[in-house]
């Protein structure tokens, strides 16, 4: 049983470690032999090991040189055997590095970081999202999971790529979803709305089963699937079709002298929305009175969230109640 275990252990050791172990065993043996053959030129075994390492690597400093025939024969044997051994070790290191880089680009290497963002589904929208995060939070680590990309180079996008289906636990474990700070699931525009939403909901369930705390942002295309996405565990549901339809409606208004798309686009890039539970000193007071209090802190009030009702720019007679949430915008 012990012999079988040792054989199994040996075969599981990477070839680089095997070669390194062989070098660590071989060099001291040659060093010991040369110290026995020529004790005057190699007074200690450490001198012999140093000579063996320098000779075997073909560097050849010449600070220790054997002069006897037997010593030179040993040197020749070391050059023929040890030199090839060290060269093979260096070549193996290079090959391993190249293979790892290839696997990394092909999405076959697991991610071991923490507090990272996970984006599921790669498209132009995801790429731009990565650019925005890199511009504002350059230290944030990002993992992309996609099942259609053959490879994704880090030089093309500064992310860790994992190829596979995010509904599978094995793929989520490769992305270290248990330690993720946030997960975003993008809709698949190549599929029908129903198929895309079904996949997003299944992915949401899989993620929530592995991480109970991380916020999950799910993009849903059909209104019918919004409740299902919420039941699956989505923290935020992006209704991209609703948003774009509303935006198109404003763009088509002939009476409006504005550019809604550009306005909202630059607002979202330069500003960020914040929610504040109404402070005690504002309860019973009007929305207008909140401006002086919040503007001093760098926030611009734009509306109120009361339970599930959004009231953007409420009228002058509106007064705050307990548990109201003030919606503001502020600089990033």
Image (cartoon, rainbow, N blue to C red):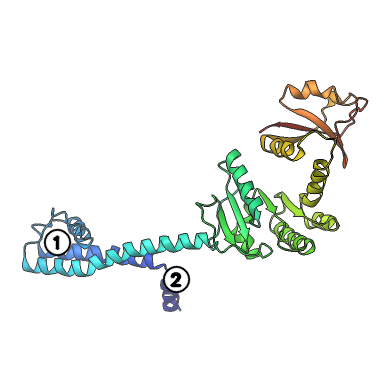
Q: Camera-side residue: 94 or 67?
A: 94
Instruction: Give the CA separation, mark 1 to mark 2.
Output: 35 Å
Image check: 325 left or right of 125?
Answer: right
Instruction: Name the residue at 20% across, 69% down.
Output: 80
Q: Identify the residue at image location x=75%, y=53%.
A: 219
Q: Is residue 312 above or below residue 149?
A: above
* Spot occupied by residue 282 in the image (x, y as percentages of width and height): 85, 25
> How many numbered markers are drawn?
2
Q: Quadrant of residue 150?
A: bottom right
Relative vertical location of residue 190 with respect to residue 280 in this rendering, above or below = below
Q: Residue furthest left?
A: 68
Q: Residue furthest front?
A: 254
Question: Please, what secondary structure does the residue beneath circle 2 have?
Answer: helix
Q: Nearer the viewer, residue 233 or 267?
A: 267
Q: Which residue is mark 1?
A: 35
Say if 3 sits above or below 305 in the image. Answer: below
Image height of 226 relative to 256, above or below: below
Q: Position of residue 92 (x, y in %)?
A: 36, 65
**Residue 292 circle label:** none
- Residue hosting label 2: 12
Spot occupied by residue 23 in the image (x, y as percentages of width and height): 29, 64
């Amino acid at each position: 049983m012990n012999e079988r275990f040792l054989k199994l252990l040996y075969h599981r050791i990477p070839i680089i470690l095997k070669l390194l172990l062989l070098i660590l065993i071989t060099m001291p043996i040659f060093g010991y032999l040369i110290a026995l053959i020529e004790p005057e030129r190699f007074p200690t075994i450490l001198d012999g090991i140093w000579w063996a390492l320098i000779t075997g690597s073909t560097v050849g400093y010449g600070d220790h040189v054997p002069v006897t025939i037997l010593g030179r024969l040993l040197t020749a044997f070391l050059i023929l055997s040890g030199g090839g051994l060290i060269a093979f070790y260096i070549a193996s290191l290079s090959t391993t590095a190249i293979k790892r880089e290839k696997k990394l680009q092909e999405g076959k290497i697991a991610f071991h970081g923490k507090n990272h963002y996970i984006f599921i589904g790669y498209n132009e929208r995801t790429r731009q999202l990565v650019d925005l995060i890199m511009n504002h939070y350059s230290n944030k680590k990002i993992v992309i999971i996609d099942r259609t990309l053959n490879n994704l180079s880090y030089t093309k996008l500064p992310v860790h790529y994992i190829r596979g289906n995010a509904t599978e636990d094995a793929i989520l474990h490769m992305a270290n979803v248990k330690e993720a700070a946030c997960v975003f699931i993008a809709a698949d525009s190549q599929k029908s709305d129903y198929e895309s939403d079904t996949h997003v909901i299944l992915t949401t369930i899989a993620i929530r089963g592995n991480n109970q705390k991380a916020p999950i942002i799910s993009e849903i295309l059909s209104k019918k699937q919004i409740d299902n996405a919420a039941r699956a565990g989505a923290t935020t549901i992006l209704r991209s079709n609703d948003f774009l339809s509303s935006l198109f409606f404003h763009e088509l208004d002939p009476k409006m002298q504005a550019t809604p798309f550009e306005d909202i686009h630059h607002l979202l890039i330069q500003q960020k929305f914040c929610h504040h539970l109404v402070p005690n000193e504002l309860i019973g007071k009007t929305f207008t009175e909140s401006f002086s209090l919040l503007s001093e802190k760098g926030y611009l009030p734009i509306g109120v969230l009361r339970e599930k009702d959004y009231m953007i720019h409420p009228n002058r007679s509106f007064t705050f109640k307990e548990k109201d949430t003030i919606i503001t915008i502020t600089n990033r």
